[in-house]
Image (cartoon, rainbow, N blue to C red):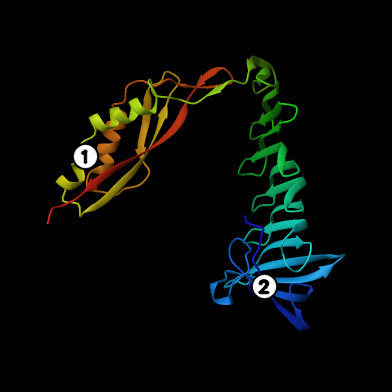
Amino acid sequence: MNFKFRIVVMIFLASFLNGFSQQYQYLYYLDENLNAVEKSKSILTGKAYYENGTLKMDCFGKTTEKLLLTATFSDSALNELQGLFRTYHNNMSIESEGNYTKNVKQGLWQEWDKKGQKTDSLIYENGIRIVKAKFYYYNNGGLSSFEVTDSLQNTMSGKSFSDNGVLNYEKSFVGEMGILKHYDSSGVRIDSVFTREEIEASFPGGDAVWLSYLRKTLNPDVAANNRAPAGMYTVIIKFVVNKEGIVSNVTAENAPGYGTEKEAIRVISKSPRWKPAKQYGRFVNAYRRQPISFSVEYGR
């Protein structure tokens, strides 16, 4: 978000505007980056007032008139964010909240989903994120897992729970070394690993060799042979590279038609073995996505 604003429209209202539970003194027309623009080009309406020496601005959707965010600036020129910054979901619950100091994030920032469940908790120092906590939930609202990373201390810790609240695993690492403890349904520890090594699944020889395989195996004329109109037809293929490096569960996420999905699935399904992904030093299943495009051109 660009916070060095060029103010081209600012209207001071002689009589206060009655607004969102405040008496507003200033009205702004803004684009998606909070730059002031002509009213006809705006997508946000900013209404502002002074409080404790800073300018508080509530931004509303131009068409919906719903409150989307609240920002605090040093003054009415809007050149410097200084204080509370908050965004809202479309159901008016808080989406994110934190503070700026001279246009950079500072201190605690938090994020919530539409249900009001905290998903992220972060600490910034002069605009640099130094601590991050991530939270995941089951559909019933129960905590599924959380993970905390500290970039200054180079530490990572976390826990995972079953849907009935039983501890599945806990982890604690400094750098790449530490311990991950697994538990059974009765809470008895059943296994431990001592590295946080993570490696993505990869094709032997790298991306260039994988693309070469696709070019050699794919029939590029499938769409044209099925009388597709001139144009580009791109299929997104999702597949799994299992613990043994075998490709499985190959599906198309979209359907451009003219035989393109079937041909793309055929090519991916015939793939030689991959190098499987690793997580915490162990081989794991990994999802991959691959776009495959078919071009159709006809001479005049």
Residue located at (35% from left, 33% from top): 250
Q: Which mark is residue 28?
A: 2
Please, which residue is most extreme toward the bottom here? 15
Q: How much space separates mark 2 and mark 1, taking CA atoms? A: 53 Å
Where is residue 185 drawn, in percent x and y?
65, 23
**Residue 20 location (% of width, % of height):** 74, 72
Say which element carries label 2.
strand
Q: Is residue 130 left or right of residue 195?
A: right
Left/right of residue 139 with respect to residue 48 in the rendered view: left
Query: What is the x, y in percent for residue 67?
Result: 67, 66
Question: Residue 107 sits in which quadrant?
Answer: top right
Residue in the image at 67% along x and 39% along y: 135
Question: 93 or 222, which is in the foreground?
Answer: 222
The part of the image, by quadrant, that contains residue 222 is top left
Q: Quadrant of the N terminus?
A: bottom right
Question: Helix or strand or loop: what does disc 1 sit on?
Answer: loop
**Considering the image in quadrants, where does the C terminus appear?**
bottom left
How many numbered discs?
2
Identify the residue at image location x=30%, y=35%.
Answer: 265
Q: In which quarter of the image is residue 21?
A: bottom right
Task: Give coordinates of residue 249: x percent, y percent.
Answer: 38, 32
The nearer-to-camera label among 2 and 1 is 2
Which of the numbered marks, if any, corresponds to residue 220? Answer: 1
Residue for point 84% across, 67% down? 51
Question: In the image, what residue type sits under mark 2?
Answer: Tyr
Q: Do the residues labelled 2 and 1 touch (CB within 8 Å)?
A: no
Is 16 on the left or on the right of 5, as rendered? right
- Mark earlier in primary sequence (2, 1): 2
- The answer to whether 51 appears left or right of 119 in the picture is right
